[in-house]
Amino acid sequence: MPSISRPNRISVLISNYNNGRWLRSCVDSVLSQTRMADEIIVYDDGSSDGSLEILRSYGSKIRLIEGRHTNGRSSVASQGNAVFEAFKISTGDQIHLLDGDDLYEPKRLELFEEAWTPDVVMIQAPMRIIDEEGATIRENYESSKQRKNYRRDTYLLNDVHFYYPCSGLAFSREYIAKILPFDFTSDPDVSTDARLSVIAPLFGRVLALEETLSCWRQRPYSISRTTNRRDPLAGTLRRHYYFNNMARLHGFRTIILSLNFRFWLQKARRFFPAWISAPFARMPEGRPHSG
């Protein structure tokens, strides 16, 4: 008799620290999916704002890890630790990430699962950017991130800036197990989403869906607002050096910073006089979509 393959198990890993104001809408968005998750694991990093009371109220609907906040540890390292601790007790074949102040659209898990094939290590989808009250600011669909062959374009463009933030990403268990735990002794400011996404094409196929399937809440003091967005050039350098360090570690070819068009464009905007950089002011950071 032909073997009957079991359906993929889906794990959603939520990382939370003092997101109590938005936490219930975050968890409820996972519980109201058209394709239910097999498990929802929430790592709380020692919140002091009532988050734990909210999370405990869900009972057996979620698996709660009550972590301990470490003073002096960066927010980047804290988030990386949250993902690792949640992953350790997860059982899913597909690992979906979600920040405690973001949320999923109702068909997120269903459409990701439909797109998954055995050779895929990562799937991403655009996100709707919302404010603190949940009102839409804009859609963040970017054609430069919708690529047919991420590994080819990584080496063709010597660039790795092709990926959406944390709550727009999901990974295969086999892949993520090769990368965790993170080593923050080098490249300490590289975010969790970048650590997982930029090197994913080296290990298998990466897909980008067209439909907006998550909401990304932008707040004044969130991690994304206080790192790369404040200094795009520094973000490019961090991602570049991290990619090359990981490529060497796993036996893959590195990329060349001097051949990265984004790097030179960002450098021109910062260091050259206005009369030189002005023609580039409205140019997108990165070359046209190569297909």
Image (cartoon, grey):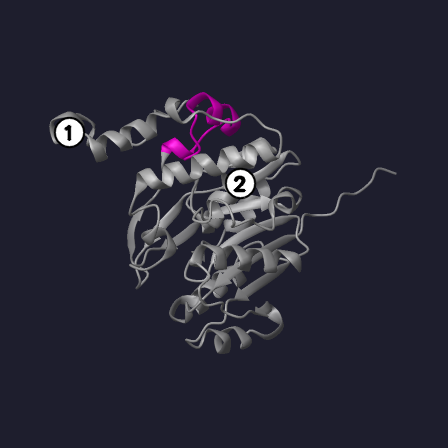
Per the rendered image, the range of residues in magenta is 143-162
Tell me which amino acid carries mark 2.
Answer: Ile
Q: Using the image, tell me which numbered label, if any, was put on residue 278.
A: 1
Q: Which residue is drawn at 43% across and 65% down?
A: 25
Image height of 276 relative to 238, above or below: above
| Element under disc 1 | helix
Hey, which quadrant is residue 285 in on the image? top left
Image height of 130 relative to 283, above or below: below
- 265 left or right, relative to 199: left
The one of 117 and 49 positioned closer to us in this rendering: 49
Q: Using the image, tell me which numbered label, if any, was put on residue 62.
A: none
Q: Is residue 175 visible?
A: yes
* Mark positioned earlier in the residue sequence (1 or 2): 2
Q: Which residue is drawn at 34% across and 25% down?
A: 261
Percent of width and height locating residue 246? 55, 37
| Furthest residue toward front | 185
- 196 left or right, relative to 141: right
Percent of width and height locating residue 73? 46, 61
Percent of width and height locating residue 238? 41, 40
Q: Which residue is drawn at 22% across and 35% down?
A: 270
Q: Which residue is drawn at 33% across and 30% down?
A: 263
| Furthest residue toward right | 1
Tell me which amino acid carries mark 1.
Answer: Ala
The one of 243 and 128 positioned closer to us in this rendering: 243
Hey, which quadrant is residue 201 in on the image? top right
Q: Can residue 208 be seen in this view?
A: no
| Element under disc 2 | strand
**Residue that carries the numbered disc 2 in the rendered image:** 123
Q: What whole-number distance in Å separates the C-alpha atoms at marks 1 and 2?
A: 36 Å
